[in-house]
Amino acid sequence: METYLICLAVAMVGGLMLSRLTKLIHLPAVTAYLVAGLLLGPFFMGAIGLPGLGFNSLEQVGGFDIVTQTALGFIAFTIGNEFRLSQLKAMGKAAIVIGILQAVFTTVMVDIVLIAMHFLFPNVISIPCAIVLGAIASATAPAATLMVVRQYKADGPLTRLLLLVVAIDDAVGLLLFSVSFGVATALSAGQVSVMAVVVEPIVEILLSLVLGSLMGWLLNWVEQFFHSRSKRMTISVSFVMLTVGLSTLKFQLGPVHCGFSLLLVCMMTGTVFCNICSTSEELMSRVEGWTTPLNVLFFVISGAELDLQVLAQPVTLLVGVIYIIARSAGKYFGADVSCHLTKQPKPIADNLGITLLPQAGVALGMAITAATLPGGGLTRNVVLFAVLIYELIGPTLTKRSLIAVGEIRPEGRTSARQHNQPRAV
């Protein structure tokens, strides 16, 4: 246990110290945390084998899944708080249209490019692999986006729309992946399962929404028994942890395999809670302060999880580069087209797609599931390579896009956090 505690402490301190260096070149703190994870990971300092000084193996990194899953739950809970009725009335319809269209557009574009690649080079990538990668391409990392917004206190039309779109994007991505994975499985096995392709994805989404709604209502009910701010914050933290635990449960109802989406459950919990609790904004500000160290750990561990061995595989690099180009084009043009359809201002249409490029935990989770398919190892490695690239450059691109529309002030002699206080809606 002492080794794990030392390792976590070194990870947090290392991430924070590196963030001071990246600040000098105006990079977001999340990039520093990811790079710190890489340096402390099993391919650099961890390779020394000194207990506590970095992560000695990928298996050891996997032992911290409880930390990353809990952090992801709090991140999703926080994003759920963006779905306040006032926000939804202002841009809810546009966010839903953009969230759905850009995700579908990205999936179709990546599918077309990779399937064409299959016909040109059949031995490089299979059709099932191409279909699954197309669905994974739709997913955007909510954590990196939220961390950039928090660090620079970004606020404005693009920021508000972005947080709503990211939340919707993950729900759509889950459905697209479930359907695509079912189709890919059917192609590999030679038979189509309506249960796997249609029924189970819909059941998972519905169960996640129901469980999230119930937990949001229960959280509000329990909060009413406490008046101390510290105790109410403790209850909120406890409920998010409980929600994360419940969302990992799996069971079977007859022929249907049932489970929950951690992101959807926690987002729905935050959405219901923020709309029925009159003091939710104050409580959320306190919860966000409590979870800051947890978020630092999340990104440092995420950086340590990146398997650099994929860089030595030419096929992975070839497919990975094509995947990154196709996905980036899909996100950019998909967001641009959907923004014009919903009559968004040109600055938002030009920059929203760039802010949707980060990709991490959700995509990796999908890739692990896809690895069970024949040839699924390529899918996993391509996603690992793409995540490595997107996580290192995505936060910086998000920051620059928000600066371009004036929702983050460029850093100068004073801290951006002092300038970018939330403006009135």
Image: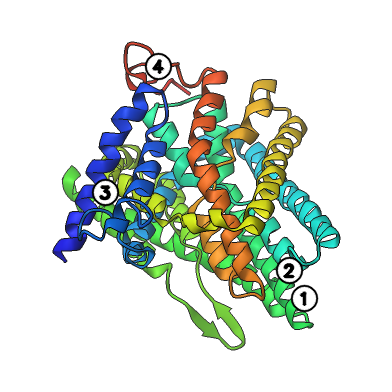
Separation of residues labelled 1 and 4 (CA atoms): 52 Å
Q: Amino acid at mark 1?
A: Leu
Residue indicated by mark 1: 187
CB atoms of marks 2 and 4 within 8 Å? no
Q: Would residue 290 be seen by someone viewing this image from the given angle?
A: no
Residue 327 screen position, x and y as percent: 68, 46
Q: Amino acid at mark 2?
A: Pro
The secondary element bearing badge 3 is classed as: helix
Separation of residues labelled 2 and 1 (CA atoms): 7 Å
Q: Left of 352 or right of it: where is 250?
A: left
Q: Nearer the viewer, residue 161 or 115?
A: 115
CB atoms of marks 2 and 1 within 8 Å? yes
CB atoms of marks 3 and 2 within 8 Å? no
Query: Badge 3: few (under 14), some or many (20 or more) residues near its Cα, within 10 Å?
Result: many
Residue indicated by mark 2: 128
Q: Nearer the viewer, residue 299 or 57?
A: 57
Q: Left of 329 or right of it: where is 25?
A: left
Residue sticking out furthest to the bottom: 254
Separation of residues labelled 2 and 4 (CA atoms): 46 Å
Q: Amino acid at mark 3?
A: Ala
Q: Amino acid at mark 4?
A: Glu
Separation of residues labelled 3 and 2 (CA atoms): 38 Å
Residue sticking out furthest to the left: 2
Separation of residues labelled 3 and 1 (CA atoms): 43 Å
